[in-house]
Image (cartoon, rainbow, N blue to C red):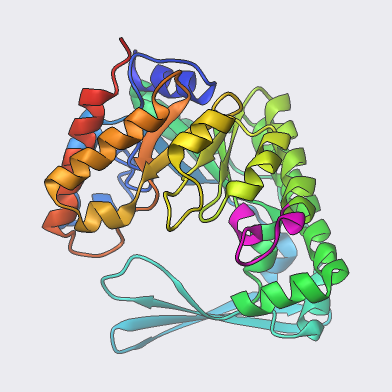
Amino acid sequence: MNSRERLIKALKGGIPDRVPISTYELVGWNSDSFENQQESYRPLMDYIREKTDCIYMTGVSMVNRYVQEHTRVEKWREGKSTYIRVTLTTPKGELTKLDRIDCGINTVWHVEHFVKDDYDIEKYLSIPDDLVPVDTSHLKSIEEALGDKGIISVDIADPLCTAAELFHFGDFTVKAYTDTNTFIKLLDKIAEERMFFLNDMLKKGAGPLFRIVGPEYATPPYLSTEYFHKFVCNYDKKMIQLIHDYGKLARIHCHGRIKDALPHIVEMEADALDPVEAPPSGDIELKEVKRLYGSHFCIMGNIQLRDLETASEEEMRNITIKCMEAAKEGGGFIIMPTASPINVPLSPVTEKNYRVFIDTALEYGVYR
């Protein structure tokens, strides 16, 4: 089997020739990504391209013309940090947010969020829906370059993800608990936009896999399970159904304590779930997820980034073997890390452990 065939087989719950190996956000064939631009990552990325199955994570721009035309951006440097202030002028007033990017760390820190009080919610709700059809031309180029070395996975945030990230995290949980009806107004507005964009992507051939991000915002200890159903199932199930209507596959991305959310993920009819974190980051063992839900969706995980960054080579090998023993049987399993390194330069320990993980997965992942 080639990598494309292997991944599709596993995502559909089948048994391929071996367990597919994904390195998650370290995407070997994305020449524009930071890990393929950094010299310290080069040897590992060469190894990843040679040995693993590429799930090429990418996105499609979702443009609201009103937002585009009424947004201004300011950037400045302070020491080793770059600050980015975004101001959006709505019909009911201005919304502002502030982000920070630190040198040597490939992530964005949200210093200030758009929504700080109830007046800001009203401003956001007043934004007109002037939605622009999507451009998916880059997906065709990626697909042609990728060939049989893997598949495309299109990231799309669900309504909860977009709504939660409007707030400081503590403010989000308080608003969700104490003023649920108002929070649902936000979700409803975002859901209409999201379904428009998703439908347009699908009509234009996007896929074969979609990764829906955001459900983790409604897991313990942040919100109880009833909110997972209100804020996730009621919206993501419709997204998944639309994806299935076009013959594509839907993958739910949900970090953290997922045990009580798993029946709802089954209810949504997701094809796959990632990253299925091991305790203490998660609250259920991989073997239990496989036993209880392995017939319902493909499991993607459960190699912890902290182990890749800190374990000895022997420990890393044993961790990988344990994952195989827990979830390989019967197919429907893709072994992969739960997160990816963001530091520059790449630690030699992390590089070595990635190689051990990949080599061990190749050795123990073959189906006889």
The residue that appears at 67% across and 52% down in the rendered structure is 158
The residue that appears at 77% across and 71% down in the rendered structure is 177
Q: Is residue 292 left or right of residue 174?
A: left
Residue located farthest toward the right when viewing the structure as drawn: 181
Q: Quadrant of the C terminus?
A: top left
Residue 171 percent coordinates (x, y)? 67, 79
Q: Where on the picture, by quarter, is residue 203? A: top right
Residue 42 percent coordinates (x, y)? 16, 48
Residue 313 percent coordinates (x, y)? 13, 46
Q: Is residue 114 left or right of residue 356?
A: right
Residue 169 percent coordinates (x, y)? 60, 75
Residue located farthest toward the bottom when viewing the structure as drawn: 78
Note whether 279 is above or below 83 in the view shown. Answer: above
* In the foreground, 207 or 48: 48
Q: Is residue 296 magenta?
A: no
Q: Is residue 216 magenta?
A: yes
* In the foreground, 246 or 51: 51
**Residue 162 appears anywhere in the view:** yes
Query: From which residue to which does the magenta span run?
Result: 215-228
* In the foreground, 1 or 147: 1
